[in-house]
Image (cartoon, rainbow, N blue to C red):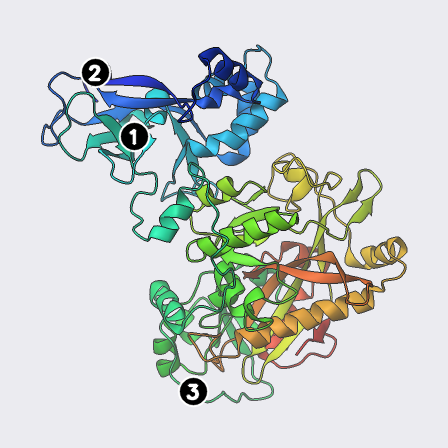
Amino acid sequence: FHSQVFDAGEFFGIMQVEEVEEGAEEDNEEIEDELKKKPNPGNELCYKVIVTNETGLQAADPNGIFLIDHAWTYRVEHARQQLLNVPGLLHRMANLMGIDFHGEVADEGAIEQVLQEMWKYNQTYQLSQGTAEEKVPVWYIMDEFGSRIQHSDEPTFATAPLFYIPQQIAYTVLWPLRDLETGEEVTRDYAYGETDRLIRKCMLLPWAPAEVLDVNYSTPEPSEDHYQAILNNNKEKLPVAINPSVYDRNKIFKVYTDLPQVINNLKHPRFEFTEDEGEADILYNFSHFKDYRKLSAERPHVMLNQFPCENLLTVKDCLASISRRVGGAEGPKWLPRTFNLRTELPQFISYFQQRERRGEDNHWICKPWNLARSLDTHITNNLNIIIRHRESSPKVVSKYIESPVLFHREDVGMVKFDIRYVVLLRSIKPLNLYAYDVFWLRFSNRAFSLDDLDDYEKHFTVMNYAPGVTLKQVHCDEFIPLFEKQYPEYSWKNVQAEIFKAFAELFQAASAKPAPFGICDYPSSRAVYAIDLMLKWDTTTDGKRTMQPQILEVNFNPDCDRACKYHPTFFNDVFSTLFLDETNNCHVTCVV
């Protein structure tokens, strides 16, 4: 680093290899003509990196460690813009990937090819500190030298990204795994660290296409060990058994909270705030509570706004696995077909390839297990992209809803929309669940079609966090008549009944087994969740078109800003329902 010595050229050389089919006896000119007819002749050439130093390379030599520059570092959502706007970038990437592009003007076709092809070159890292936005994985492409190091199951070298803080720059470190002689090839393992043969085969599909149709794509619910591991990982301590507390009918409850929305909006005469956690009757906190064992043993009468093991609902991979209790390995009708990319990669690829074979729609959406607001969420119909996304943060992949029920916006046309319901979980045994009578709508800003998959404003509805983007708001009282006018055969009352049926089934599944395999039945727990859903078109066995709710996610401690702004009694209603068991005049509907 200090002396900035650029000496890779003294040790390595890049060799161009032409892959010619074995047994090809024809005249070379004929072969060249054939190659020229192929849509992308550039890809026929293959590069190899070889050791050229006369004395070879010794693994024990302290100088045998090299740094590779990164040619392009970016976040996926900015890739297209950068290829369009950064001078020389498209040219360099097209050359590096063997894509024919000689123009000066960035053309859409070349950009599209780079965006598809780059997943064979991409590497990734993420920062462990900072805001949610800053933790979104970064992808990078090594320079021409690094990008031409080929794969081997028995690699001669290893690589790893290194972030050098003084320069605020990332490099890739390259070092030999054994002694090499001159003329030997520099290779690395593209599925580094994975030992399972089937999973290695799946991870290497972008470079070595293969079919895995013989893998059974059914995904039964994971074993009890899986849930036990999640509990241990979360460091949650389950409560001891307690009896439900009985309170005096006129008791005034002391509330300890760190939520400004609660402090500013809870005005109910039977609640008062305290700054002393030790004297509180109710703990209503934003951060996750962990030690239920201590609380249940020492202060069993203290109520709180969360349930032990509720992450089984609020984390996307868990939501998918507990939902398999309804509707078997395919999952319930109200949840898009979902695979955990960490543990179900071969099943997913088999399912994808079966659908491809049958000519069915194959658009999928990749989501991190545990980030909100559509961060690091990607829509694609390219299998390689999904396989590579698995290398960044833990993700699920869900079937993208290709036939959503749309809403007509005067200014734009037919757009996607999603619906957010706030649900109040009063108890697990017996299961007691309410939905707040006001629901919230979010709309896309551009007319929907199954293309431009990286066009955020066409495919996503979360607009209130993106700077400078229009946020279309329609109150539910205004929405229902508009919806029924657009879809006269579908009354909102019936649609909502289907939605509530899905909520009931979801919470029944989540509470069907004892903790840690289900949400814990802790009598002092209460909770508020937001459920985001969409409607999709489905067809019944007798050919009738129906609107089928699709649950997208369940959020813990949702942002209730809009709720408080338009419905000042919101937190009075919530607290009254959850802590006083009084639901009269509280704008809630019993779901279970």
Q: Amino acid at mark 1?
A: Thr
Instruction: Give the vertical position of 226 relative to 118 (above or below).
Output: below
Q: Could you say which quadrant of the image residue 453 lies in?
A: top right
In the rendered structure, which amino acid carries the disc numbered 3? Ile
**Is the C-beta separation of discs 2 and 1 under 8 Å?**
no
Q: Which mark is residue 242?
A: 3
The residues tagged by marks 3 and 2 sit, at their Cα atoms, a distance apart of 69 Å
Q: Which mark is residue 7?
A: 2
Task: Look at 43% across and 77% down and name the residue there.
Answer: 515
Q: Earlier in the sequence, mark 2 or mark 1?
A: 2
Decide which of 313, 306 is in the foreground and name it. Answer: 313
Q: Give the class, few, some or many, for how many residues have Cα within 10 Å of label 3's Cα (few <14, many ≥20).
A: few
Image vertical order of residue 219 relative to residue 588, above or below: above
Q: Position of residue 392 (x, y in %)?
A: 41, 44
Question: From the viewer's perspective, is 437 left or right of 87?
Answer: right
Q: Residue at x 32, y 53 (%)?
A: 196
Q: Quadrant of the N terminus?
A: top left
Asked whether residue 269 is in view, the answer is no
Q: Secondary structure at mark 2?
A: loop
Q: Quadrant of residue 532?
A: bottom right
**Can the viewer see residue 423?**
yes
The residues bearing labels 2 and 1 have C-alpha atoms spaced at a distance of 15 Å
As helix, strand or loop, the secondary structure at mark 1 comes to: strand
**Towards the viewer: 121 or 280:** 121
Badge 3 marks a residue whose secondary structure is loop
| Residue wearing tag 1 | 172
445 sits to left or right of 93? right
What label does residue 239 carry, if any? none
Please state the horizontal and vertical placement of residue 485, each as a whole percent of the image: 90, 55
Left or right: residue 178 versus residue 556 is left
Residue type at mark 2?
A: Asp
Q: CA distance from mark 3 to mark 1?
A: 55 Å
